[in-house]
Amino acid sequence: MSTSVKRSRPRKASEEAAPVLSHADQLQALQKREEGKTVMYKQDAWGHIETRFVRTQNVKAWEEKGFFVR
């Protein structure tokens, strides 16, 4: 039976914290990211609604998955 050897691992560098955005800035970034996309929905058996922002050329594929356009 082999003996286990514990090796020390080097510490990871700490990540820089992301800048804190105001609510208005967050909404503006969200709208910019969703610009030009189609909003699609799917409701499950429990009544939960899943929302996806889909590129227009992919709408047909998402409709085949059971999603519908708003």
Image (cartoon, helix red, strand yellow):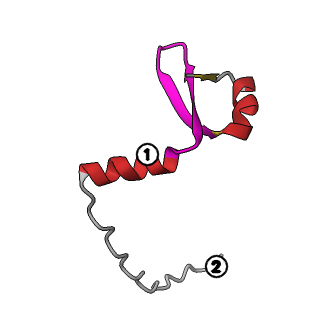
* Cα gap from disc 2 to disc 1, whole angstroms: 58 Å
Question: Which numbered tag is attached to residue 31?
Answer: 1
Pointer 2: what residue?
2
Dot 1, crowdedness within 10 Å: few (<14), some or many (≥20)?
A: few
Report the number of numbered marks.
Answer: 2
For the residues carrying marks 2 and 1, which lies nearer the camera in this image?
1
Can you give x and y, in whole percent of width and height, for residue 20 in the image?
26, 62
Residue drawn at point x = 58 percent, y = 80 percent? 3
- Which amino acid, by three-letter code, is at mark 2? Ser
- Which amino acid, by three-letter code, is at mark 1? Gln
Determine whether 39 is above or below 47 in the image: below
Q: Is residue 52 magenta?
A: yes
- 69 or 20, which lies in front? 69
Q: Main secondary structure of the magenta part?
A: strand
Cβ atoms under marks 2 and 1 closer than 8 Å? no
Identify the secondary structure beneath mark 2. Answer: loop
Question: Which numbered tag is attached to residue 46?
Answer: none
Can you give x and y, in whole percent of width and height, for residue 5 in the image?
53, 83
Q: Quadrant of the C terminus?
A: top right
What residue range appears in magenta? 34-54
* Residue 53 found in image quarter: top right
Residue drawn at point x = 59 percent, y = 40 percent? 37
Can you give x and y, in whole percent of width and height, for residue 14 in the image?
36, 79
Determine whether 26 is above or below 10 in the image: above
Dot 2, crowdedness within 10 Å: few (<14), some or many (≥20)?
A: few
Q: Is residue 47 magenta?
A: yes
Q: Quadrant of the N terminus?
A: bottom right
